[in-house]
Image (spheres, grey):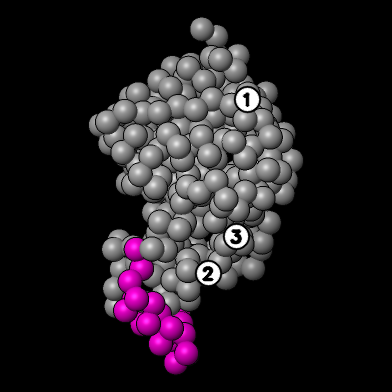
Amino acid sequence: MLRALEVTTRTGTVLKGNIFKSPGAQAVVILITGVEGNIRNNPFYTVIGKKLQQENVDLIVGHTRDAFNRVVTFNKKTGKKEIYGAFDEDFQRSDDDVAAYLNYAHNVGYQHTILGGQSFGANKVIHYLAYHQPSIDHFLLMSPVNVEVLRKSITKRQRQMINERLSSGNSTKILPFRLFRWLTSTAANANRWLHDDTLNNVHVSQNGGADQLAKIPYSGALLIGMYDRFAGGSPVRYLENINNHLPTSRENELVYIPNTGHIYRHQEGKVAQAIKNLLQKWEIIKK
């Protein structure tokens, strides 16, 4: 059964996620979503959720503050109207969002928890696990984003316009162009994408910063589509490089999905089956 799921961060922000619920499930997979990568935009969440329901495993689609471009809600602590979204995200609040979904899972009392994320959600999971030690079984990093690829897509003229907005005191106004060609954004948000390295934690180069990866003590799996455009031209080398910086590299599984890209179009079933296979290998579900 698919149903809405609301969780509250420590500061009172209400996040609107979804859960594929199975009666009496003792295991849960939490997938933190990417930028505007909500369940409406990405069909693979539904395919995964239905596959896991067949195995009596719950799936939480963890919409964080950037899952939709703009969300209007009321803060649980202050009672005041709150507007958040991908148009103006504070990356340094991502740990609070991840924690809210983990707290929900803890309160339910699942025996097994897999913490995962897709796209920029995977970057958020990396950051969280680098600085916290939640009670989880494994991680699942699906198509983490190389932030440098996104930064390179911002043209010189666009950067000039961003700086003009910042210097003129118009940082909160929406830019007259879409960042990365698809994201409606304020100048302040665009500036964070250019300069805030909080979630800039995976790289194509072997010499890229890997401080966060090196701090993660958990084992798990990394998954990517072979046409992923954020992988610097080689998804295989990209995942291998990320894994090589993890202390558990020899224990981890690397999964490559052929004939698909960043959000697994037309191969959603293969992704769902791959996740089922991982859960079987980790003995969370029986073969």
Question: Please, what secondary structure does the residue beneath circle 3 have?
Answer: loop
Exactly how many numbered labels are in the figure? 3
Q: Residue at x 40, y 38 (%)?
A: 235
Q: What residue type is labelled 3?
A: Thr
123 left or right of 216 in image: left
Question: Please, what secondary structure does the residue beneath circle 2 have?
Answer: helix
For residue 184, above or below residue 271: below
For residue 119, above or below residue 240: below
Which badge, 2 or 1, comes first in the chain's sequence? 2
The residue at which mark 3 appears reads as 198
Q: Give the range drawn in magenta.
A: 153-172
The residue at which mark 2 appears reads as 195
Q: Which residue is drawn at 63% across and 44% down?
A: 213
Q: Can residue 52 be seen in this view?
A: no
The percent position of residue 62, horizontal first and vertical second, equals 51, 44
Are circles 3 and 1 on residues that touch, CB within 8 Å? no
- Front label number (2 vs 1): 1
The residue at which mark 1 appears reads as 250
Which badge, 3 or 1, comes first in the chain's sequence? 3
The percent position of residue 50, horizontal first and vertical second, equals 39, 25
Given residues 135 and 118, the one toward you in this image is 118
Q: Which residue is drawn at 38% across and 63% down?
A: 152
Given residues 257 and 285, the one toward you in this image is 257
For residue 3, above or below residue 137: below
Q: Identify the main secondary structure in magenta.
A: helix
Question: Please, what secondary structure does the residue beneath circle 1 have?
Answer: loop
Given residues 3 and 88, the one toward you in this image is 88
